[in-house]
Image: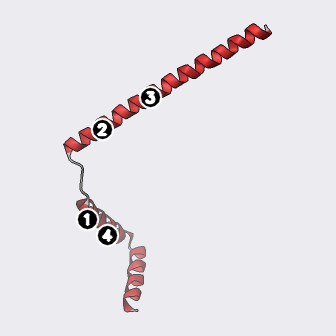
Amino acid sequence: MFMNAKKVTDIEAQKKNPIRASVDFFGALKRELRTITWTSRSDLRKYTKVIVLSMLLSGFLVYFADLGIQRILNGISLLTRMTFG
């Protein structure tokens, strides 16, 4: 019961003092950033190469699919014009 009352008074105190709340927030942010395990430089380069290659590959795939659809539609248009004048 006492712990819950203390939490409520801490929250109320932070609402009244926005500077203190900001200091607490950035302190917690700094502690959280220390716990992060960052990717090594060599792994980051490998992952970047994979992403760039997959983006290029998917771009070419969309491009060639678009060309194929365009040719099919042009063929249908040509047949329609030849048939109906």
Q: Earlier in the sequence, mark 2 or mark 3?
A: 2
Q: Are marks 3 and 4 in contact (CB under 8 Å)?
A: no
* Residue drawn where x is 41% and y is 78% of the image: 11
What residue is pinned by disc 1? 31
Q: Amino acid at mark 4?
A: Asp
Q: Disc 2 or disc 1, which is closer to the eye?
A: 2
What residue is pinned by disc 2? 48
Calculate the distance from the C-alpha at mark 1 to the C-alpha at mark 4. 11 Å
Q: Secondary structure at mark 2?
A: helix
Calculate the distance from the C-alpha at mark 4 to the C-alpha at mark 2. 35 Å
Q: Tell me the crowding category of disc 2: few under 14, some 14 to 19, or many 20 or more residues within 10 angstroms, Cα based.
A: few
* Residue drawn where x is 68% and y is 16% of the image: 76
Calculate the distance from the C-alpha at mark 3 to the C-alpha at mark 1. 41 Å
Q: Tell me the crowding category of disc 4: few under 14, some 14 to 19, or many 20 or more residues within 10 angstroms, Cα based.
A: few
Q: Earlier in the sequence, mark 1 or mark 4?
A: 4
Q: Earlier in the sequence, mark 3 or mark 4?
A: 4
- Kindly identify which numbered label has been placed on residue 44: none
Calculate the distance from the C-alpha at mark 3 to the C-alpha at mark 4. 46 Å
What residue is pinned by disc 4? 24
Horizontal and vertical percent for residue 42? Answer: 20, 41
Q: Secondary structure at mark 1?
A: helix
What residue is pinned by disc 3? 59
Instruction: Kindly indicate the quadrant of the structure image that contains residue 60.
Output: top left
Horizontal and vertical percent for residue 66? Answer: 54, 23
Q: Earlier in the sequence, mark 2 or mark 1?
A: 1
Instruction: Left or right? Give the position of 54 relative to 30.
Output: right
Q: Earlier in the sequence, mark 3 or mark 1?
A: 1
Q: Amino acid at mark 2?
A: Thr
Instruction: Kindly indicate the quadrant of the structure image that contains residue 23.
Output: bottom left
